[in-house]
Image (cartoon, grey):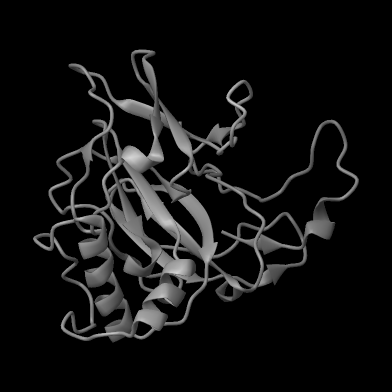
Amino acid sequence: MRRNALSDFTNVKSNGKIAMKLPDDGTKLVNARICSEDDDVMLVTTSGRAIRFPTTEVRVFKGRDSTGVRGIKLQGDDAVVSMSVIRHFDATADERAAYLKMRRQQAGASDDEVSNDEEGNENASISAERFEEMQAAENLILTIAAQGAGKLSSSHDYPVRGRGGMGVQAMDKAMRGGALVASFPVELADQIMLATSKGQSIRVPVEGISFRSRSAGGVKVFDTGKNEVVVSVAWIADQGEDEDETDVVEPASE
């Protein structure tokens, strides 16, 4: 991955500009987003690993023809499926653990499948004011797996760690819902469009998807058939009261 100044992409001709040099090993560009130095980058892989780190850990490259730096360490045939930019927030491990426990209670989620790779004390406590502050800074992370399972989880459930590691668990270890297809931030008022390998599609309101721990499995969002998998998930922004026009953003995965 790499970070460039927007000024590197001025005066773009009709045939485009090379944004990043890719090695000749089948590597593909996953995503590109505008970010600031107050943001974090989150990468998620098909095997259910996620890593989150400050954008400042990726230096600003002067040119556009280098391959960049490692964002996450991959094993076997694992591959990055999603790159998102989310709000940075500084909180201790105990604050995060206390917030997530209260957040699950608020959402009616079970504590049975809580992340086991956290350093925080889940018996810690935070004030109501701190909870509100963290909730205001929270991104909801939507995760969808190939067999149609999905969930919402809190961005505070993804610890900020250094770039280049293996990350943390973003789905149940058994991966019962199949490989991850997409993972990106959403708002409750948004909708998503899922498409399958057999050409079926469904439009789903985000608010109807269950809130769960990042290490928990998903719940059924799309009832896929035999030998059918979800291949693409697109975000549809909230249009308020105007139902005639729909702003469909690029697919998160194909």
Q: Is residue 166 visible?
A: no
Q: Is residue 165 above or below residue 22?
A: below
Depth check: 48 or 142 in front?
142
Q: In this rendering, would 91 be left or right of 157?
A: right
Q: Quadrant of residue 116?
A: bottom left
Q: Residue at x 20, y 72 (%)?
A: 117
Q: Is residue 19 above or below residue 157?
A: above
Depth check: 160 or 165 in front?
160
Total number of numbered labels? 0
Q: Quadrant of the N terminus?
A: bottom right
Residue projecting furthest to the left: 112
Q: Position of residue 209 (x, y in %)?
A: 30, 41
Q: Is residue 25 above or below residue 48?
A: above
Depth check: 18 or 230 in front?
230
Q: In this rendering, would 171 be left or right of 161?
A: left
Q: Residue at x 65, y 50 (%)?
A: 21
Residue projecting furthest to the right: 11
Q: Quadrant of residue 104?
A: bottom left
Q: Is residue 98 above or below residue 242?
A: below
Q: In this rendering, would 172 be left or right of 214?
A: left
Q: Position of residue 145 (x, y in %)?
A: 28, 38
Q: Position of residue 29 (x, y in %)?
A: 56, 44
Residue projecting furthest to the top: 199
Q: Quadrant of the C terminus?
A: top left
Q: Is residue 100 visible?
A: yes
Q: Residue at x 60, y 35 (%)?
A: 239
Q: Position of residue 4 (x, y in %)?
A: 72, 61
Q: Residue at x 56, y 75 (%)?
A: 57
Q: In this rendering, would 106 be left or right of 138?
A: left
